[in-house]
Image (cartoon, rainbow, N blue to C red):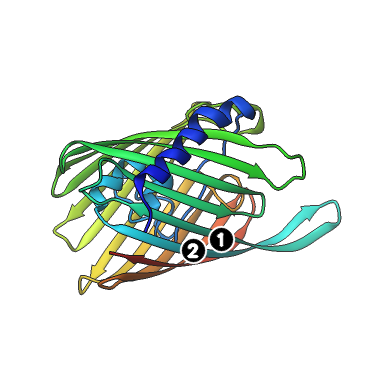
């Protein structure tokens, strides 16, 4: 469907050339698929398909498939203060990603494009297993194009490592917004510890504490119940975490479900944000893989 040489070229352009051309800025937790949204933003230790591009690039080699994912998010704020008084606001986000996690490739990679109401973003991720089926490392770069008519373009990145310690435990360490270059705007480097606990194959628990470079703490936590090996029910909670469609930290919860077929998966989530702005969202996703 695509090859690693093309992705490597994009990665070099993003990493080497764009930082010299543009001032850098950051947007934490840039994208949530319906799965990660339902889990409260958790699953850094075990993202599926295109999620790995955004949450944890080092996990791509463990997925070992080709995939194409499409996601549509619609959201609405409650009555929100504005120069025009109290209003209701509605918006939507779109995302498309492609990923090559095949084991026969020299390295594994993915590319994603996201359209949000505040910006458009391009992500490029590269990863490699250090010890097969045990430890991998990854890096990604992102370009942010704000929708503010300023013509500004910003660059940052993510560094991560994953360990499949036991059948029941997976652990990942992630540094997001690596260059920490837009703290005056409230966007800080984020250190994330992703964990996944597999309880006898009948319950999957994700606990992802994180710390921003201003030393404020938060977490994302979720629980996933597999049914009949192909249907999943999910619940999640977040505290002091980045809410992608708001572009700022907040508190909320999520819920959703997913179905995984032989070559396709379908996912849906509902989420509610309490702070900083009360909001509701619906997230729909479809992925094909082979």
Quarter assignment of residue 279 = bottom right
Q: Which residue is drawn at 45% across and 58% down?
A: 33
Residue 140 location in percent, x, y? 42, 38
Graded by Cα atoms within 10 Å as few (under 14), some (14 to 19) or many (20 or more), the crowding at tag 1 reads some
Q: How crowded is mark 2: few (under 14 residues within 10 Å), some or many (20 or more)?
A: many
* Left or right placement of residue 263 versus residue 146 in this view: left
Q: Where is the C terminus found, in terms of image quarters?
A: bottom left
Quickly name the residue at label 2.
71
Front in this rendered view, residue 87 or 18: 18
Cα distance between the residues tagged 1 and 2: 6 Å
Q: Nearer the viewer, residue 165 or 13?
A: 13
Element class at badge 2? strand
The residue under label 1 is: 94
Which residue corresponds to the image point at 42% horizontal and 62% vertical from the top-left? Answer: 69
Secondary structure state at the residue bearing disc 1: strand
> On screen, 65 above or below 28?
below
Screen quadrant of the N terminus: bottom left
């Amino acid at each position: 469907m695509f090859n690693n040489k093309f992705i490597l070229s994009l990665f070099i352009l993003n990493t080497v050339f764009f930082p010299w051309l543009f001032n850098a800025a950051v947007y934490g937790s840039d994208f949530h698929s319906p799965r990660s949204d339902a889990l409260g933003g958790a699953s850094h230790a075990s993202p599926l398909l295109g999620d790995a591009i955004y949450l944890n690039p080092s996990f791509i080699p463990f997925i070992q498939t080709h995939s194409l994912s499409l996601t549509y998010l619609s959201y609405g704020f409650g009555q929100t203060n504005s120069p025009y008084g109290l209003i209701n606001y509605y918006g939507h986000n779109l995302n498309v990603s492609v990923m090559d996690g095949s084991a026969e490739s020299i390295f594994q990679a993915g590319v994603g494009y996201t359209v949000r109401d505040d910006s458009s973003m391009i992500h490029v991720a590269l990863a490699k297993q250090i010890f097969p089926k045990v430890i991998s490392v990854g890096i990604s770069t992102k370009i942010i194009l704000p929708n503010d008519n300023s013509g500004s373009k910003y660059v940052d990145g993510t560094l991560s490592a994953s360990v499949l310690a036991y059948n029941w435990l997976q652990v990942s360490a992630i540094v997001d917004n690596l260059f920490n270059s837009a703290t005056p705007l409230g966007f800080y480097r984020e250190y994330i510890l992703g964990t996944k606990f597999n309880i006898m194959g009948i319950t999957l628990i994700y606990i992802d504490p994180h710390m921003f470079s201003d030393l404020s703490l938060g977490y994302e936590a979720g629980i996933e119940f597999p049914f009949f090996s192909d249907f999943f029910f999910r619940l999640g909670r977040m505290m002091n975490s980045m809410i992608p469609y708001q572009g700022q930290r907040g508190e909320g919860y999520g819920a959703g479900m997913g179905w995984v077929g032989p070559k396709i998966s379908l996912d849906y989530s509902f989420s509610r944000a309490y702070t900083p702005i009360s909001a509701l969202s619906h997230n729909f996703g479809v992925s094909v893989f082979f």
